[in-house]
Image (cartoon, rainbow, N blue to C red):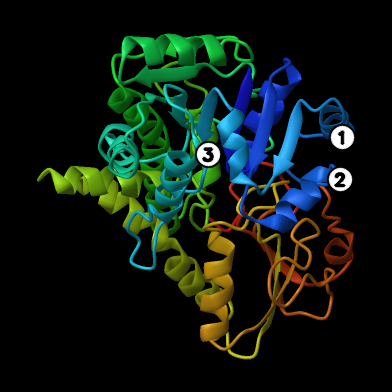
């Protein structure tokens, strides 16, 4: 089968390679020419993708990275895997989805299957994608939703062994979509409508957002009552049923957890339903930057001005080079606003963020462990008298006190 995947970020490229592995001809489409050039030479930092394999698939013409959307004309299935971020007002930004719809309407052949993997609110496939494409062309298409469930850097759960949820507008679309995903996914879970599929994905991440907010609030209580948050969580984790651990942090990052619940809240508000719990969780996690900065100020004798502070790791997740919604960036900004002289070290991000990564310094007043990548060597700090605090949500003991 010939497949076009619109969007070659960590979702689209992972899907494209996964489908190409089993023999499909996959056109990986992206508007960013630099990203296409990198993929053409097998250069990617997307977890789970290996340069040698990408080059072999390109050589066999199973995978074709391209900026030319006209290849859609050859395809039997088009998968949308574009970003669905928030705008400056923290409202859903549907511009990438809208652009993908316009491209499909222009190039796709009649009766092909269009699948949306991009995370969005329930009703997106039916009321946004289908409506937008139908307003631009008289051609008929099949429509299905199969939300992505990729966890960057997770080697235990991959595209192949993570169950795939599929919902469609028609039985024919459902059948074609299931047959397609069954070629490279071990398990398919059929649901009655695309709205259920969309809601399942958005609820998965809302669950995590709410529980992270709960444990962040718990860490504030623990501080006031003078007990260890982590020790209490470890004790609670000994219960073999009815509980799963979450750990406090300076906030949440990445494309999913800080964003998806807002899409659900947005949809709820459109229908007159007030998503109080979701909105409160969003606020609680966003407020952690202010709370942590206040705590640091107290720790450093009430003043952060002119203190030399270095952050270790600014990506949103350990061993992933992704800065989207990273709370570390908010912490950098807040500390600078309070007059601190702030630097950062992140060997994975490198020069991808303004200012550039600086090696761990001993010429500082305070070191903050934020995202402890496995490639970070903490020995310069370990051999010094620098005060270091661990702000990371990991349970690993780096030899310095947990701050939350």
Q: At 80% across and 50% down in the image, what residue appears? A: 38
Give residue 247's mark.
none
Quadrant occupied by the N terminus: top right
Placement of 55 over or under 24, stated as above or below? below
The reply to whether the C-beta atoms of the residues labelled 2 and 1 are less than 8 Å apart is yes
Q: Of helix, strand and loop, which one carries label 2?
A: loop
Between 338 and 29, the residue placed more toward the observer is: 29
Q: Residues within 10 Å of mark 2 (few under 14, many from 20)?
A: few
Please say if the residues under marks 1 and 3 sit with CB atoms less than 8 Å apart. no
Question: Which residue bears the numbered disc 1?
Answer: 55
Q: Which residue is mark 2?
A: 41
SS for tag 1? helix
* SS at badge 3: loop
Could you say where residue 149 lies in the image, as x and y percent from the top left?
A: 52, 29
First in sequence: mark 2 or mark 1? 2
Q: Could you classify mark 1 by the number of other residues whose Cα lies within 10 Å: few (under 14), some (14-19), or many (20 or more)?
A: some
Which residue, given by chain and number where applicable, does mark 3 sit on?
81
Please name whichever residue, 313 or 134, is drawn nearer the observer in this view of the structure. Answer: 134
Instruction: Examine the rendered structure and indicate whether residue 288 appears above or below residue 396.
Output: below
- When asked about the image quadrant of residue 115, the answer is top left
Quarter location, residue 5: top right
> Is residue 240 visible to the viewer in this orientation of the structure?
no
Q: Earlier in the sequence, mark 3 or mark 2?
A: 2
Whole-percent x and y of residue 269? 17, 48
What is the quadrant of residue 59 in the picture?
Answer: top right
Which residue is depicted at the point 67% across and 54% down? 371
Q: Identify which residue is drawn at 56% across, 58% down.
A: 326
- Residue 389, image x and y in percent? 66, 62
């Amino acid at each position: 089968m010939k497949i076009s995947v619109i969007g070659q970020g960590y979702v689209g490229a992972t899907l494209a390679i996964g489908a190409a592995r089993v023999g499909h001809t996959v056109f990986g489409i992206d508007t960013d020419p630099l990203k296409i050039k990198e993929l053409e030479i097998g250069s990617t930092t997307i977890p789970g993708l290996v340069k040698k394999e990408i080059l072999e698939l390109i050589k066999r013409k199973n995978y074709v990275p391209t900026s030319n959307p006209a290849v859609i004309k050859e395809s039997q299935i088009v998968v949308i895997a574009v970003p669905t971020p928030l705008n400056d007002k923290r409202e859903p930004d549907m511009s990438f989805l809208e652009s993908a719809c316009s491209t499909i309407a222009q190039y796709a052949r009649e009766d092909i299957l269009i699948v949306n993997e991009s995370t969005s609110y329930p009703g997106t496939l039916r009321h946004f994608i289908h409506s937008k494409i139908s307003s631009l062309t008289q051609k008929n298409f099949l429509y299905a939703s199969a939300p992505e469930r990729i966890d960057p850097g997770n080697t235990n759960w991959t595209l192949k062994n993570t169950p795939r949820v599929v919902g469609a507008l028609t039985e024919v679309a459902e059948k074609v979509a299931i047959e397609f995903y069954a070629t490279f996914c071990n398990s398919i879970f059929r649901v009655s409508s695309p709205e259920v599929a969309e809601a399942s994905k958005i609820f998965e991440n809302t669950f995590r957002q709410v529980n992270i907010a709960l444990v962040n609030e718990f860490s504030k209580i623990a501080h006031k009552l003078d007990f260890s948050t982590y020790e209490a969580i470890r004790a609670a984790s000994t219960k073999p049923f009815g509980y799963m651990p979450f750990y406090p942090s300076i906030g949440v990052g990445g494309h999913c957890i800080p964003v998806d619940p807002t899409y659900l809240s947005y949809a709820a508000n459109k229908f007159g339903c007030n998503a109080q719990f979701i909105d409160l969780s969003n606020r609680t996690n966003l407020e952690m930057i202010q709370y942590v900065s206040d705590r640091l100020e107290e720790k450093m004798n009430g003043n952060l001005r002119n203190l030399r502070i270095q952050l270790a790791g600014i990506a949103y997740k350990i061993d992933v080079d992704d800065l989207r919604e990273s709370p570390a960036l908010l912490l950098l900004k807040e500390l600078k606003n309070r007059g601190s002289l702030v630097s950062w070290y992140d060997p994975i991000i490198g020069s991808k963020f303004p200012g550039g990564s600086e090696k761990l310094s001993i010429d500082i007043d305070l070191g903050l462990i934020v995202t402890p990548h496995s490639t970070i060597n903490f020995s310069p700090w370990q051999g010094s008298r620098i005060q270091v605090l661990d702000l990371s949500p990991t349970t690993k003991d780096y030899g310095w006190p947990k701050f939350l």
